[in-house]
Image (cartoon, rainbow, N blue to C red):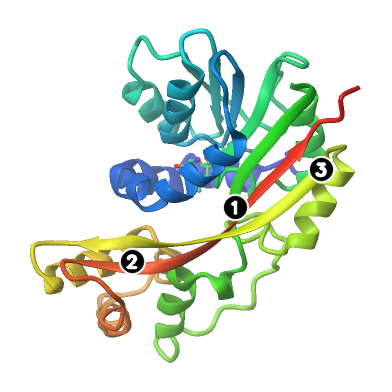
């Protein structure tokens, strides 16, 4: 039997992890507004203990630590050594945040130790999401809360749909992905998320749509911003996989096609594109 989450662990300790570390400040700026919405839903209070799942470079852990204060505690866990390395480097010494390299679906968390189970885009990658959430639920105290943000479907997210659409005729169309396979859009379907959380033992499950425009390119001029947006899309966006192993000619055509599509997006010295997420909340039963 294959080890749980082996593919994701390999990817986040290789290409995806490296790309996120290299572009960490940019990616943090892009998804900041989604993280803030999830933190607002979590409503962390002074002194609370928070488990930040798939914390990456730790931006949400730091924001949560600022909210819970010195009497509280945030534990950020992530399967990627490189991203946890970055999270440790970025966290001020006196911040009540600790970081651990671990697979959140099987890590040995102290039972009932956390008030809040939180994640900013870090819970969509489990091979067995119900098993993972049931495991993480045991780390929550009775009555503890869940709040996370995850993407809605790929078709609703322009940052995915537009660049991939621009690829038509340039790279052969990929087989339609399994919408439930671990990956950024695997929690796109609201019924599936609710079923996973209910099967894992949570109650009071709610999903609220949250849409925001995110900056994907910036520069001194609109042209520079467009160049920057295309670079980001090819390096860390959905195209990075579609173009893996392709030669310079295809990459140049892809670049031009994406630039043409992005030219229709708003922004003066920037390029902004729409993202569509769910803010998910739930609760551990009181006993
Ligand atoms: C899209 S990134 C989000 C990172 C971070 N939360 C942020 O918003 O910047 C997803 C993260 O989930 C982590 N991840 C994937 N599977 C995981 C697992 N089974 N346990 C812990 N972390 C995992 C990845 O390593 C990656 O850092």
The alpha-carbon separation of the residues under discs 2 and 3 comes to 40 Å
Q: Residue at x 18, y 67 (%)?
A: 225
Residue 32 lies left or right of residue 49; in this view the side is left
Q: Nearer the viewer, mark 2 or mark 3?
A: 3
Residue 190 lies left or right of residue 166; in this view the side is right
Q: Of 209 and 6, which appears nearest the observer?
A: 209
Q: Is residue 57 visible?
A: no
Q: Which residue is mark 3?
A: 204
Q: Nearer the viewer, mark 3 or mark 1?
A: 3
Q: Along the polypeptide, which appears first: circle 3 or circle 1?
A: 1
Residue 48 lies left or right of residue 253; in this view the side is right
- Residue 1: where, in percent of width, then height? 81, 43
**Crowding at mark 1 (Cα within 10 Å: few <14, some 14-19, many 20+):** many
Q: Which residue is mark 1?
A: 150
Q: Residue at x 49, y 76 (%)?
A: 161
Q: Which residue is mark 2?
A: 234
Above or below residue 108? Residue 35 is below
The alpha-carbon separation of the residues under discs 3 and 1 comes to 18 Å
- Residue 192: where, in percent of width, then height? 79, 59
Residue 58 lies left or right of residue 262; in this view the side is right
């Amino acid at each position: 039997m294959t080890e749980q989450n082996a593919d994701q662990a390999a990817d986040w300790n290789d290409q995806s992890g490296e790309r996120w570390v290299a572009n960490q400040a940019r990616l943090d700026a892009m998804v900041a507004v989604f993280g803030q919405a999830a933190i607002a839903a979590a409503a962390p209070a002074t002194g609370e203990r928070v488990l930040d799942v798939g914390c990456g470079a730790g931006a949400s852990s730091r924001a949560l630590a600022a909210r819970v204060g010195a009497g509280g505690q945030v534990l950020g866990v992530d399967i990627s050594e490189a991203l946890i390395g970055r999270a440790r480097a970025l966290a001020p010494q006196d911040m009540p945040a600790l970081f651990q390299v671990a697979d959140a679906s099987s890590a040995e968390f102290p039972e009932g130790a956390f008030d809040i189970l939180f994640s900013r885009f870090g819970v969509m990658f489990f091979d067995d999401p119900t098993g993972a959430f049931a495991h993480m639920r045991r780390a929550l105290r009775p009555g503890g809360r869940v709040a996370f943000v995850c993407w809605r479907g790929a078709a609703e997210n322009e940052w995915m749909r537009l660049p991939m659409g621009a690829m038509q005729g340039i790279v052969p169309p990929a087989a339609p992905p399994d919408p439930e396979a671990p990956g950024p859009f695997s929690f796109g379907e609201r019924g599936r998320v609710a079923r996973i959380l209910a099967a894992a033992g949570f109650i009071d499950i709610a999903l609220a749509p949250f849409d925001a425009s995110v900056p994907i390119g910036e520069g001194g001029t609109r042209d520079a911003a467009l160049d920057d947006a295309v670079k980001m899309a090819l390096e860390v966006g959905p195209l990075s996989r579609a173009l893996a192993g392709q030669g310079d000619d295809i990459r140049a055509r892809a670049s031009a096609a994406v630039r043409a599509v992005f030219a229709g997006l708003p922004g003066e010295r920037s390029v902004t594109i729409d993202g569509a997420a769910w803010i998910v909340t739930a609760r551990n039963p009181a006993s």
